Amino acid sequence: MRPSLIALSGLSLVLSSPAWAGDAPTIDAERMNQAVRVLASDEFEGRAPASAGEEKTVAWLVEQFRAAGAEGGGPDGSFVQVAHLSRTRQDGPATIVAHVGGHGGGHVGGRAIDLVRGPDVLVSSDRPVSHITVTDAPVVFVGYGATAPERQWDDFKDVDVRGKVIVVLVNDPDFEAAASDPVAGMFDGQAMTFYGRWTYKFLEAGRRGAAGVLVVHETAGAGYPWSTLQNSSAAPKFDIVRADPDAERAPFQGWIQRAKAEQLFTAAGLDFAALKESARRADFRPVVLPGLTLSVDFGQVADRVETKNVLARIPGSEHPNETVMYGAHWDGYGVGTPNAQGDKIYNAAVDNATGVAALLELAHAFAEGPRPRRSVVFAAWSGEEAGLLGSTYYAANPVWPLETTVADINVDSLLPGTEVDPNVVVIGKGKNQLDDILARHAAATGRVLIADPAPQAGAFYRSDHFPLALKGVPALFPAAGFTGASAASRDYVQNRYHQPTDEWNETWRMDAAAADVALIYAVGRELADSDQWPDWNPGAEFGPARDASKGMRR
């Protein structure tokens, strides 16, 4: 193969696995294209959860999976799993005040530092209540807030933070480390780990009983400016309905501008920059901000909504209780703010009507080929754009046991076109043994695997395989077209991503995407017809969860 893009049409993959190599199914590029056309049409209104667009999307997907030859993969053999969500929205202003020094309830002799929601600090709550009040809570700096035993790292040590507001740094302890620094590489360098994600820091605060958590925003470490956070701060927040939300969610969570954090540290007689540097050492211990407390008060509207995951299944002939899963989110942003052309429907064609079209095509392929030995499940998730909600709900309420889910292969955004990129980007490359299987099948078609070109963005932790990975399920996330080198990928990211311009048009061809689907079909087919149990590589943060269920696999 020449080291350039390969023009393909009428795709079918010739595979080397013995049971089905001579009879590999054709991946129908035109059928995929037409599925994208339907899903991304204005009729589906941008496919927002809990909308008329959801009802149309779910009904259409059930019909298509059934026509492909799959059966229901949801509860009691249905095609639908209802996900129960908690929604909170701002209701009125917020009062956020730091008190420094003084004594007594009136803070006699002290002073107050007012923080303004929006320009200074952002706060919200996932607790399903109408009012949040935290009064005079002590403030503790806990470095990066990471507890990572597999990396011999614990920022909390034995310090009890119950009832306290914790302040944490964004990203990982080694993000800004020099090559000579002892921490360099301990958290994968520029490649963000789960411990660097704000979602982890919020979860850890709730788990430890903190009164609140504020992540110090810095553009380099976050990967986006403060304006990105501020612009979306008034949007509703969603979480799955939890049996005991107080045990898993702090009363409030949010972000604080670095300049404001520095002001608080200075008021408490501390040097923020020096403490930040000390947080890059494994012997770091939490530091109380002496004489400083924080009070937070705001109202919110809390209610519940329902949305639906669509689950289809090809049952295994020999080991039906062992599952190979493919997933893609069906949701988009629905109807929103009009662009300069007055278009207000966020059609979400590439992201992610293409991934759902891939699921349908994979269902055809498995249904039309020899019956797999293990079961194969196709999960069209809801609520990815609102925070991986559908897949998070499934991970908490699995229909098929996660302990015997062999792998989860994620499909999130395929670019249209006819030229196949010889480089297959793997988001999270090196985390588990699925890479080896993918690499072997890629090599059979003249392609090679490459790592995520922007690992600092933490993309592995921002798509629907992630909630299952947290439970230990090995995950594979190929993103073949998004190498950052092609004009098409740059144009999409700059001009269409999460915009009304992410639309299908008559010039679309899905030949290259069909090659990508054929590749992940090969991986899933091998797993479904084998006795393999791919594992996480040593040091991966999800390995302990998988190890804990080892006895449940044959």
Image (cartoon, rainbow, N blue to C red):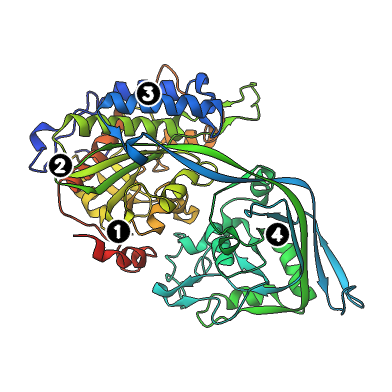
Residue type indicated by callout 4: Gln
Neighbour class for label 3 at 10 Å: few (<14), some, many (≥20)? Answer: many
Closer to the eye: label 2 or 3: 2
Q: Is residue 406 above or below residue 52?
A: below
**Residue 131 x %, y %:** 74, 54
Residue at image coords 69%, 60%? 256
Q: Is mark 2 on a helix, strand or loop?
A: loop
What residue is shown with label 4? 257
What residue is shown with label 1? 432
Residue at image coords 31%, 37%? 421
The answer to whether mark 3 and mark 1 are in CB contact below 8 A is no
Q: In this view, does 198 lie above or below 274?
A: above
For marks 1 and 4, the one nearer the N-term is: 4
Q: What element carries label 1?
A: loop
Side (left or right) of 393 relative to 524: right
Neighbour class for label 1 at 10 Å: few (<14), some, many (≥20)? Answer: many
Residue type indicated by callout 1: Asn
In three-dimensional space, the C-alpha distance between marks 2 and 3, rounded to whole angstroms, equals 29 Å
Closer to the eye: label 3 or 1: 3
Side (left or right) of 286 relative to 77: right
Residue type indicated by callout 3: Ala
Determine the residue located farthest toward the front in the rendered image: 76
For marks 2 and 3, the one nearer the N-term is: 3
In three-dimensional space, the C-alpha distance between marks 2 and 4, rounded to whole angstroms, equals 56 Å
In three-dimensional space, the C-alpha distance between marks 2 and 1, rounded to whole angstroms, equals 27 Å
What residue is shown with label 2? 317
